Image (cartoon, coloured by chain):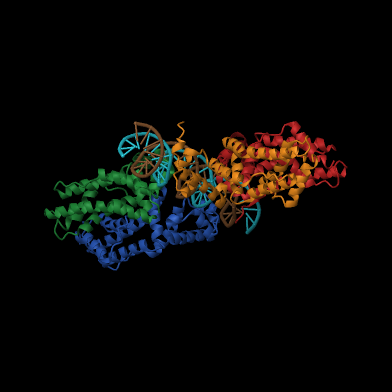
Chain colours: A red, B orange, C green, D blue, E cyan, F brown
Amino acid sequence: MMAPNAQRRSEKSHQAILAAAMDLSAERGYGNVTVEAIAARAGVSKKTIYRWWPTKGAVILEALGELAQTTTTFPDTGDLVADLRTQTAAVLDFLASPRTGSAYLGLIAETQHDEALARDLVEQLIKPRVAVATDRLRSAQRQGQLSAEADLELIVELLYGPIYYRRLLHLGPHADDRLHALIDHVLSQWR
Amino acid sequence: MMAPNAQRRSEKSHQAILAAAMDLSAERGYGNVTVEAIAARAGVSKKTIYRWWPTKGAVILEALGELAQTTTTFPDTGDLVADLRTQTAAVLDFLASPRTGSAYLGLIAETQHDEALARDLVEQLIKPRVAVATDRLRSAQRQGQLSAEADLELIVELLYGPIYYRRLLHLGPHADDRLHALIDHVLSQWR
Amino acid sequence: MMAPNAQRRSEKSHQAILAAAMDLSAERGYGNVTVEAIAARAGVSKKTIYRWWPTKGAVILEALGELAQTTTTFPDTGDLVADLRTQTAAVLDFLASPRTGSAYLGLIAETQHDEALARDLVEQLIKPRVAVATDRLRSAQRQGQLSAEADLELIVELLYGPIYYRRLLHLGPHADDRLHALIDHVLSQWR
Amino acid sequence: MMAPNAQRRSEKSHQAILAAAMDLSAERGYGNVTVEAIAARAGVSKKTIYRWWPTKGAVILEALGELAQTTTTFPDTGDLVADLRTQTAAVLDFLASPRTGSAYLGLIAETQHDEALARDLVEQLIKPRVAVATDRLRSAQRQGQLSAEADLELIVELLYGPIYYRRLLHLGPHADDRLHALIDHVLSQWR
DNA sequence: TTTTAAGCGAGACGGTACGTCATGTCTTGCT
DNA sequence: AGCAAGACATGACGTACCGTCTCGCTTAAAA
């Protein structure tokens, strides 16, 4: 498996590839992005892409990871409900934005028939963000805004499940008031 | 756009195509199914497939529609909680079964970059089943097992959202007790 | 080895491919011809080329075969020496022409590391033309211009060997008088 | 075009490259030898090869030149016919040997689309050996074994032309008696 | 009952992208 | 400065499917 030497890697090409991948995904949609087009747009050889990533999905995952880290952090103003409203709205925006939405949804689609990519998606994108959400809830617990018996894992599922469900099954995004109703209901038992 | 004459359609080929599509999906996973392979397996010309369906997704959708109708009906024993447990477990099985799971998840994946297919999936598979679930909840309302103020649409989202969320984002299926906890929590406010 | 069905072959594409191959060979030299370029020039998919020929050499061989048949026939005026002068000069022209020379020499080069192509070259181009030359000599024998003991095979080698030798080893083509001296010498023993 | 400093050249790498080139040519045939494979086999960087030779053909040419010098010298026992038999047989062996034949024929093939290599081949390999043959014939002339009017250049062509012709055009090598007939015929006019 | 036009199997076709290979250039340390 | 190692842009390879398109053949509706 002779892994290439990461020290000699061209950082310029690396960044050009990530940028090209996101640009193309925004322009033509994830499904119409090809490794060939990424290479052409980035001014890079296909070999260079295949040297460092196994599939186009892995490229998009890394590019998206960079974006996700900088754009969506979890707020902690002390008011749990307000923070959850802010955060879920940000997730809705992320899913709706032409730049990130198509790439993210396309990536999730790809993971349905690419196990390795699925593992990477979960480890690099999903789990860290679930952890951040859980942390915020735990902090609320310490502040007494949430009962000590609250099932934090369940709460996370109940908040994000419906959002992804409606998006991936094409049932239309939540309106603001539906989102607020969702949050209220989920917290109702343990407030 | 001369639509073909459905009366002269060969029912034998029709069924062979649907069966081949499901078989291949079960054997090698939705992503590795191709129109060419379906045609070869069904002993049918590619032209015949393209005459009646626009994409392989549409073929799978029809095949899955037939299966879904026969396998998952919503029980009504009078005990809402028991019925929800039965039904959500059936959905988990449907998603986990090699025969139906790969096809269904692959289909959902495909709809992320095929709007026409997305519309058909929603109209033919998703909405009818949401309606059935909503009907069952409404029946429970009439029987007094659920408050009249209960937000039925929200309940459906809260039940199925987490199931699809965990499946599509590769967070592992729910264990039985987690599923029960989910149902209990969702109903808690309006029982 | 599912051979394709030759009856359904597109004669238009067939001819376009042969023409494109010869054109490109004339324009850029055999070594710079690629299957990809032939396909593009002929307005044909690469798959169509690979369906009917194993390598670009086989394409050129067929194209050259068509040309060779029509252009170089062996004259029989009754005067053996005159006919040999005419014919060897025609071979020199064939080797020197931009249209045929590059293709033919490139083809011979390719056969040095492609055994299958070598076999086809010999059977389809070389041997038939050697046979024609031998026939002409045999006819001269019957007319008494050549002794009955003449070693016809040897004569053919002695005539064409030096021509190919000088061409392939880059020793420059024969001037007319050297060609005549060659013919005279070869026939001297058996006239 | 800063030529590299030959004094600082690593003789070890130099020899390793020549040896690797010949080994690979013998093992897999000239056509399957690549600069990359030579570099890997010789434990040398590709850069080092390109620093000192323009193409793989040039490497093989140099390697072959070393071998040719040591293996095939022209005998002079005083008996011209015997010496020609010895020498032409040696040429047949050289062409048939797995070590030298594939490399030499492959090299000749390459010169059909590489003019610079062609020039080098002629100057470094072909012409010197033609000169040696011509010298031997001239010596025979002085000894009265060959008429003073003999066309030495023509004799060389008539001897070696058929040998290369049969080899390069895949007509099979000469049997011993055919070789002797060839020599007899060529000398007949001027003995 | 015959005609006849549609569906049908087979599969060749023009395309697009795939993932791989070798080229010749280049950069980075080591000797 | 030469060198081993090897990343890089380039460009062709041969393959896989796509969706379109003839071909004859069979086959069921209309005549």
Task: Determine which quarter of the picture holds residue B62.
Answer: top right
Q: Nearer the viewer, residue A109 or A189?
A: A189
**Quarter in which the N terminus of chain A is drawn:** bottom right
The reply to whether residue C33 is visible in this rendering is no
Q: Is residue B95 above or below residue D26?
A: above
- Give the side of residue C80 with respect to residue C89, left or right: left
- Give the side of residue B88 with respect to residue B35, left or right: right
Q: Is residue D7 above or below residue C69?
A: below
Q: Is residue B135 above or below residue E20?
A: above
**Quarter in which the C terminus of chain A is drawn:** top right
Q: Nearer the viewer, residue D69 or B48?
A: B48
Give how far across and how far down residue C93 sits, in percent: 28, 44
Q: Nearer the viewer, residue A151 or A62?
A: A151
Outermost residue, left side: C144
Outermost residue, right side: A144
Give how far across and how far down residue F27 sits, in percent: 39, 42
Give how far across and how far down residue C42 sits, in percent: 39, 39
- Give the side of residue A114 with respect to residue E16, left or right: right
The reply to whether residue A17 is visible in this rendering is yes
Task: Determine which quarter of the picture holds residue B64.
Answer: top right
- Give the side of residue B117 with respect to residue E6, left or right: right
Q: Nearer the viewer, residue B29 or B113?
A: B29
Counting the numbered discs, the total is 0
Give how far across and how far down residue A13 sits, in percent: 62, 42
Q: Residue at x 62, y 37 (%)?
A: B122
